[in-house]
Image: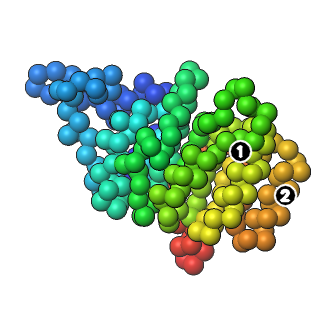
């Protein structure tokens, strides 16, 4: 399998599709993944190149799904959601909780419905350091798709992304202030980075999973 695209927001549906298995003795679901008898060996997609999922998946199950491909260097696109459809926030600290994603082959990183800012601090600067710490372990990412939803004071995060030398394309839905939007677009233009403000949109066929640098020269 080379690509997995799940556009449903339902964690239950995604879990049934990806992590339900029948053996000669039992049927296992995603709810059983902490059981020592859970057949995690069935979740092996070492040649996976693209994993996009709009459903929030617990870190351990995500590791089963993408870990072998990331370790083997085949994974190129990783786009995940961190909040369930019921509003439960599964936001991990990626550098701590998602080490199985570290790879110098991933060129596109997508992250939706995330926030490391507490409710008490919601009027302060949007805290994005965990995102930058994660990118430090993904040195060749050229395209970033960040869709946390509209938040105040996110210009600093977008500007830090624009100033990363490797990044050539950014899609975001978080800049809510028009002054911030124009400031970000101005800096993107000066740095030669494509910046698009748009709501999250699932991939459409035929999708192009090449890095931005390859698309420009094709």
Crowdedness near tag 1: few (<14), some (14–19) or many (≥20) residues, C-alpha within 10 Å? some
Q: Distance between the residues labelled 2 and 1?
A: 15 Å
Residue 121 on image: x %, y %? 73, 31
- Which sits in the foreground, 37 or 210? 37
The circle drawn on residue 11 is: none
Q: What element carries label 2?
A: helix
Residue 54 on image: x %, y %? 52, 37
Q: Which residue is drawn at 57% across and 48% down?
A: 131
* Quarter assignment of residue 97: top left
Q: Residue at x 57, y 46 (%)?
A: 130
Residue 209 seen in the figure:
no
Q: In this view, does 181 lie above or below 81?
A: below
Residue 125 on image: x %, y %? 75, 41
Q: Mark 2 points at which residue?
A: 183
Task: Compare marks 2 and 1 and give the one earlier in the sequence.
Answer: 1
Query: Which residue is situated farthest in the left direction here?
Result: 24
Marks 2,1: beta carbons within 8 A: no
Q: Nearer the viewer, mark 2 or mark 1?
A: 2
**In the rendered picture of this protein, how many numbered marks are placed on residues?**
2
Q: Is 3 on the left or on the right of 38, as rendered?
A: right
Q: Mark 1 points at which residue?
A: 173
Q: Is residue 88 above or below residue 151?
A: above
């Amino acid at each position: 399998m080379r690509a997995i695209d799940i556009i449903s927001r339902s964690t239950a549906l995604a879990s049934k599709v990806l992590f339900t298995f029948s053996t000669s003795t039992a049927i296992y679901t995603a709810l059983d993944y902490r059981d020592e008898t859970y057949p995690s060996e069935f979740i092996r997609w070492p040649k996976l190149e693209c994993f996009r999922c709009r459903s929030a998946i617990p870190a351990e199950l995500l590791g089963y799904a993408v870990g072998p491909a990331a370790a083997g260097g085949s994974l190129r696109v990783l786009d995940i959601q961190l909040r369930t459809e019921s509003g439960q926030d599964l936001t991990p600290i990626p550098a701590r909780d998602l080490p199985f994603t570290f790879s110098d082959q991933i060129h596109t990183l997508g992250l939706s419905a995330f926030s490391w800012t507490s409710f008490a601090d919601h009027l302060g600067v949007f805290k994005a350091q965990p995102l930058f710490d994660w990118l430090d372990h993904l040195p060749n990412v050229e395209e970033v798709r960040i869709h946390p939803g509209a938040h105040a004071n996110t210009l600093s995060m977008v500007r830090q992304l624009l100033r990363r030398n490797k990044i050539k394309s950014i899609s975001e839905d978080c800049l809510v202030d028009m002054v911030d939007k124009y400031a970000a677009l101005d800096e993107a233009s000066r740095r030669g980075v494509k910046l698009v403000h748009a709501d999250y949109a699932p991939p459409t066929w035929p999708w192009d999973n090449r890095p931005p640098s390859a698309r420009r020269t094709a």
